[in-house]
Amino acid sequence: MSFKASLLHFIVMSALSLAALPAAAQERAVQLVGFGDSLMAGYQLAPSESYTAQLEAALKAKGRSVVVTNAGVSGDTTTGGLSRIDWSVPDGTDGVILELGANDALRGIAPEQSEKNLDAMITRLKARGIAVFLAGMLAPPNMGSEYGQRFNPIYQKLAEKHGIPLYPFFLDGVTTVADLQLSDGMHPNPQGVATMVERSLPAVETFLGDIQAKRK
């Protein structure tokens, strides 16, 4: 067989092999980054027990080609997040799950400042062509009703302003269940994280689908 014929044979066989692969295997895996505080980082949990790790496993179990990187920093506020958003989210990222604000509320930071910081982060990510999935938070009751009335609506306002998906409360299903929390009564244990993943999974899958649709 001539060199030209051999080369043609190689090209044809490679194309056939690629065609035989599932569609998901042919696509570049969607690169997601979980950007947040201790709730994202996995406070006192093993790396495999964090939200990002359990979410990636759940998505892959559904046949999704995805990598979910953990960029959570315990204790982070929206101000801290804004200061690191550019270098903590690498080039090539397709989407960010943005979860910040819990520590702002615990510290009594003005909700208007939290909103301004989150707004700036979303704007920067969108300018880089990175899709944003906003995970909301609720102010703790001990901050008082007036604070809650100012803090709680900021996530919906930002989602509407930027046209991005919103998961209203990241800790949904966990905050009132002691068996799903660590002894501090604030952070989820591994089972609590599993509940968070289960509840947010449909919304994240929709987010992934939107990202993949825009590739085509």
Image (tube, helix red, strand yellow):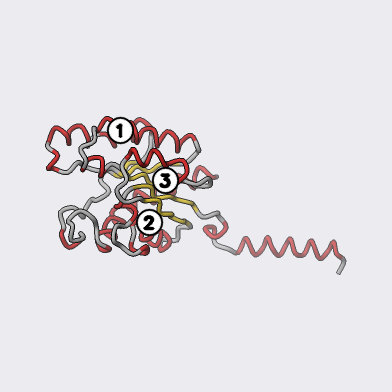
On screen, residue 94 versus residue 144, left or right, reads right
Residue with the mark numbered 3: 96
- Cα–Cα span, label 1 and label 3: 17 Å
Q: Label 3 amino acid?
A: Val
**Residue at image x 21%, y 60%?**
182
Above-or-below relation of 149 to 22: above
On screen, residue 76 versus residue 213, left or right, reads left
* Mark closer to the observer (1, 3): 1
Residue 81: x %, y % from top left = 37, 42
Above-or-below relation of 105 to 25: above
Earlier along the polypeptide chain: callout 1 or callout 3? Answer: 3
Above-or-below relation of 93 to 52: above
Residue 108: x %, y % from top left = 20, 37
Above-or-below relation of 180 to 215: below
**Residue at image x 52%, y 58%?**
24
Q: Nearer the viewer, residue 155 or 165?
A: 155
On screen, residue 94 versus residue 13, left or right, reads left
Residue with the mark numbered 1: 115
